[in-house]
Amino acid sequence: MGIGLETKSATDATNHATDATNLSALLSEDEQSVLNAIRSNPKITQKQLQEATGITLRTIKRLLPRLQEKEKVEG
């Protein structure tokens, strides 16, 4: 029985790593930074995103709709 659970855990870990790799391929570095900051604090403001990522407010305002289109964040 233990082998089955270990295999499932290993498969889940592999799937998570694959998802992260696919995400990296789909998102720019700035998009990844913004998404990570949002994951850390889902109630973060645009101004706080600017401070946390070092990305200009104008760029953040441009990136957020892109992330919504890619269904990475909700509006």
Image (cartoon, rainbow, N blue to C red):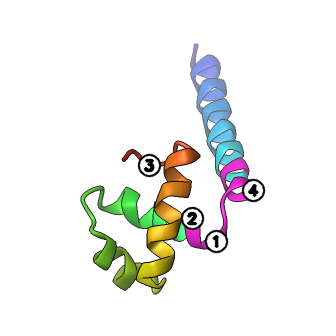
Q: Does 53 appear in magenta?
A: no
Q: Earlier in the sequence, mark 3 or mark 1?
A: 1
Residue 29, labelled with which disc? 1
Are circles 2 and 1 on residues that touch, CB within 8 Å? yes
Disc 2 to disc 3: CB gap under 8 Å:
no
> Is mark 4 in CB contact (under 8 Å) with mark 3?
no
Which amino acid lies under the numbered mark 2 shown in the image of this protein?
A: Gln
Residue indicated by mark 4: 25
| Left or right relative to 22: residue 6 | left
Disc 2 to disc 3, C-alpha distance: 12 Å
Q: Which residue occupies the foreground of this view, 63 or 17?
A: 63
Q: Residue 33 versus residue 18: which sits nearer the camera?
A: 33
Could you tell me how far apart the alpha carbons at marks 4 and 3 are, in whole angstroms?
A: 17 Å
* Label 1: few (<14), some (14–19) or many (≥20) C-alpha neighbours in 10 Å: few
48 displayed left or right of 50: left
Amino acid at pointer 3: Val
Q: Secondary structure at mark 4?
A: helix
Identify the image quadrant of residue 40.
bottom left
Q: Earlier in the sequence, mark 2 or mark 3?
A: 2
Q: CA distance from mark 3 to mark 1?
A: 16 Å
Identify which residue is drawn at 44% across, 48% down: 73
The residue to which callout 3 is attached is 73
Q: Give the structural element (helix, strand or loop) at label 2.
A: helix
Residue at image mark 2: 32
For marks 2 and 4, give the CA distance.
Answer: 10 Å
Instruction: For marks 4 and 1, give the CA distance.
Output: 10 Å
Who comes first in sequence, dot 4 or dot 3?
4
For image coordinates 64% across by 51% down, the residue present is: 20
Range shown magenta: 22-31
